Image (spheres, rainbow, N blue to C red):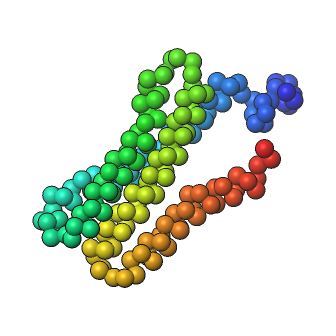
């Protein structure tokens, strides 16, 4: 390991931290990221759960009801994936497996974001179909999904590939 200005050692990531300190730092960063996504998902899921109790629900076409059911299931799966890291942390806390817990929590978060993309897509399809009955709905949804994909995946992956040497 190369020496730092203070005479200590730096790790392969250019930081002066042990594996455990790195896991602690990554855990803190991950939980902050999950909090942002979790809040939005929980609000969306809560609203989705109320739709079936609205008077207009009975007048929806069967296709729209099917889209609604798929959306609710996706919302539930998204919620599970994004709350999963909290449960994981609680169940393994103090067991000296934080680096592995961070890796699994990161995977759950990534799956949760992919499910969130599917939930948002399904929600948009349903809302725009019911609100507009317009043939442009698929194009509008495709444009929004492309925007999400750009913001959530393309730019981050481009940044990672462009600015990392590993």
Residue at left 43%, top 36%? Answer: 84
Residue at left 71%, top 28%? Answer: 17
Asked whether 40 or 91 is in front, the reply is 91
- Quarter of the rendering occupied by the N terminus: top right
Tell me if residue 35 can be seen.
Answer: no
* Residue 128 drawn at (x, y percent): 33, 73
Q: Quarter-wise, where is residue 99 in the image?
A: top right
* Residue 5 drawn at (x, y percent): 86, 31
- Quarter of the rendering occupied by the C terminus: top right
Total tally of numbered discs in the picture: 0
Asked whether 166 or 62 is in front, the reply is 62
Q: Is residue 39 left or right of residue 153?
A: left
Residue at left 39%, top 57%? Answer: 119
Q: Is residue 6 above or below residue 42?
A: above
* Residue 37 drawn at (x, y percent): 45, 49
Q: Quarter-wise, where is residue 12 in the image?
A: top right
Q: Is residue 39 left or right of residue 24?
A: left
Q: Is residue 85 above or below residue 120?
A: above
* Residue 18 drawn at (x, y percent): 70, 24
Asked whether 63 or 85 is in front, the reply is 63
Considering every residue shown, the one lying at the far bottom of the view is 135
Residue at left 51%, top 63%? Answer: 148
Q: Is residue 54 above or below residue 111?
A: below
């Amino acid at each position: 390991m190369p020496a730092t200005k203070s005479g200590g050692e730096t790790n392969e990531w250019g930081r002066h931290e042990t594996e455990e300190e790195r896991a602690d730092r990554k855990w803190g960063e991950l939980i902050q990221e999950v909090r942002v996504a979790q809040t939005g998902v929980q609000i969306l899921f809560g609203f989705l759960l109320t739709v079936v109790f609205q008077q207009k629900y009975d007048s929806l076409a069967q296709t729209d009801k099917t889209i609604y059911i798929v959306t609710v299931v996706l919302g539930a799966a998204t919620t599970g994936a994004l709350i999963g890291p909290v449960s994981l942390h609680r169940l393994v806390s103090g067991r000296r497996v934080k680096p592995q817990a961070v890796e699994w929590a990161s995977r759950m978060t990534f799956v949760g974001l992919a499910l969130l993309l599917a939930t948002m897509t399904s929600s948009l399809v349903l809302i725009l179909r019911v609100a507009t009955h317009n043939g442009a709905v698929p194009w509008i949804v495709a444009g929004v999904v492309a925007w999400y994909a750009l913001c959530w995946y393309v730019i981050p992956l481009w940044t990672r590939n462009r600015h990392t040497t590993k």
